[in-house]
Image: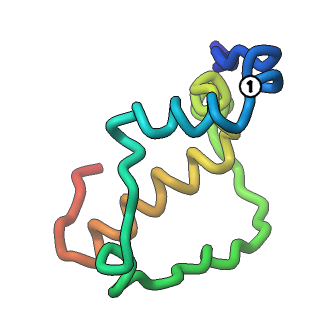
C-alpha cells in the first residue's frame, strides 16, 4: 500500500505568511530555538552511498516495495541498523 499525501495543497498554497506563522506558533512540536539550543550543534553530512548489484528473494523485495517508502532506502535502513548493532556487540539473532 502506497502512502498518499494528506496535505491540503490548495489551502496551503493560498495561506498568507501570517497564517503560516500563526499555525507554526500553535504547533507544540515547533518550539522556537535560541542560541543556547544551537551551541553544540554539529553538521552531519549524509554518508556516501555506493551502487551495488545484489540478488534477493523476490518475496523480500516485494515486501519492501509494499512498505510505502523507496524500497532501496528501507533496505539500507534495515542493514544500517544491523551493522550498528553488530558494531556495538549486540549481536542480532538470524
Q: Look at 81% across and 22% down and name the residue there.
A: 14
Horizontal and vertical percent position of residue 83? 39, 68
Q: Residue at x 74, y 30 (%)?
A: 16
x and y percentages locating residue 51 in the rendered image: 79, 68
Q: Quadrant of the N terminus?
A: top right
The residue drawn where x is 61% and y is 74% is: 46
Say whether residue 34 is left or right of residue 21: left
Q: Residue furthest left?
A: 90
Q: Pointer 1: residues within 10 angstroms few (<14), some, or many (20+)?
A: few
Frontmost residue, 85 versus 47: 47
**Quick one: 2 or 13, which is closer to the camera?**
13
Task: Pick out the residue farthest to the front.
Answer: 18
Location of residue 87 by image quarter: bottom left
- Residue indicated by mark 1: 15
Determine whether 5 is above or below 45 in the image: above
Q: In the drawing, does residue 5 fall left or right of residue 39?
A: right
Q: Under tag 1, what secondary structure?
A: loop
| Residue in the picture at 21% in, 64% down | 91
Which quarter of the figure has residue 4? Answer: top right
Name the spot of residue 24 as percent of width and height, x first. Answer: 50, 38
Relative to 48, say whether 74 is above or below.
above
Q: Is residue 63 above or below residue 39?
A: above
Amino acid at each position: 500500500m502506497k502512502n498518499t499525501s494528506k496535505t491540503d495543497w490548495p489551502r496551503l498554497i493560498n495561506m498568507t505568511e501570517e497564517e503560516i506563522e500563526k499555525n507554526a506558533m500553535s504547533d507544540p512540536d515547533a518550539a522556537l530555538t535560541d542560541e543556547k539550543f544551537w551551541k553544540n550543534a554539529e553538521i552531519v553530512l549524509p554518508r556516501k552511498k555506493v551502487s551495488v548489484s545484489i540478488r534477493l528473494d523476490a518475496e523480500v523485495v516485494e515486501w519492501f516495495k509494499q512498505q510505502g517508502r523507496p524500497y532501496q532506502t528501507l533496505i539500507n535502513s534495515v542493514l544500517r541498523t544491523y551493522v550498528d548493532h553488530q558494531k556495538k556487540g549486540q549481536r542480532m539473532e538470524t
